[in-house]
């Protein structure tokens, strides 16, 4: 890689690092919302709502297309995020 391209790469990576920090803040905010939702659930079986999951994934697919983002990327990200939060809820569910 040429020195010029290395500098460009460093700048781009710096922007990615800043973006990652913003994403972490958003994930923290989302986690706090999930905690609030979890408090409302009375039974462990309420954690997985397949209709809601399908609705979210369809909405993300359609928005991705409109924004010209590869829907495979966003679908994979959202599926993993949903599964991660399902796992989080199951680990933190407390019977009332």
Image (spheres, rainbow, N blue to C red):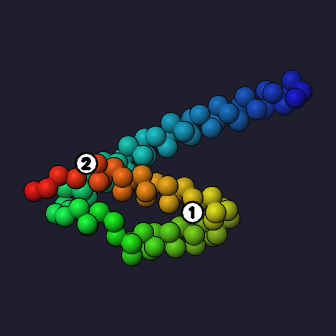
When the figure is inspected, residue 46 is found, relative to residue 85, above or below; the finding is below
* Residue at (25% x, 48% y) in the render: 92
Residue furthest top in the image = 3
Measuring from the top left, give residue 48's x and y in whole percent.
33, 66
Measuring from the top left, give residue 70's x and y in whole percent.
67, 62
Q: What is the quadrant of residue 90 in the picture?
A: bottom left
SS for tag 2? Answer: helix
SS for tag 1? Answer: helix
Badge 1: residue crowd in 10 Å (few <14, some 14–19, many ≥20): some
Q: How many marks are shown on the rendered structure?
A: 2
* Residue at (86% x, 23% y) in the render: 3
The answer to which of marks 2 and 1 sits earlier in the sequence is 1
Q: Nearer the viewer, mark 2 or mark 1?
A: 2
Q: Nearer the viewer, residue 32 or 96?
A: 96
Would residue 69 be seen by someone viewing this image from the given angle?
A: yes
Quarter of the image containing the C terminus?
bottom left
* Residue at (17% x, 52% y) in the render: 94
When the figure is inspected, residue 40 is found, relative to residue 16, above or below; the finding is below
In the rendered view, does 79 fall on the left or right side of 1? left
Residue 75 got which mark?
Answer: 1
Could you tell me how far apart the alpha carbons at marks 2 and 1 are, in whole angstroms?
25 Å
Residue furthest left in the image = 96
Measuring from the top left, give residue 63's x and y in whole percent.
57, 68
Name the residue tied to disc 2: 92
Q: What is the quadrant of residue 69 in the picture?
A: bottom right
When the figure is inspected, residue 70 is found, relative to residue 3, above or below; the finding is below
Would residue 33 be seen by someone viewing this image from the given angle?
A: no
């Amino acid at each position: 890689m040429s020195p010029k391209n290395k500098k460009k790469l460093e700048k781009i990576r710096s922007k990615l690092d800043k973006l990652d920090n913003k994403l972490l803040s958003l994930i923290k905010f989302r986690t706090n919302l999930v905690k609030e939702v979890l408090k409302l659930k009375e039974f462990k079986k309420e954690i997985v709502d397949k209709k809601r999951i399908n609705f979210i994934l369809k909405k993300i697919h359609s928005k991705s297309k409109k924004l010209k983002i590869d829907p495979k990327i966003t679908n994979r990200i959202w599926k993993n995020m949903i599964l991660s939060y399902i796992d989080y809820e199951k680990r933190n569910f407390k019977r009332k």
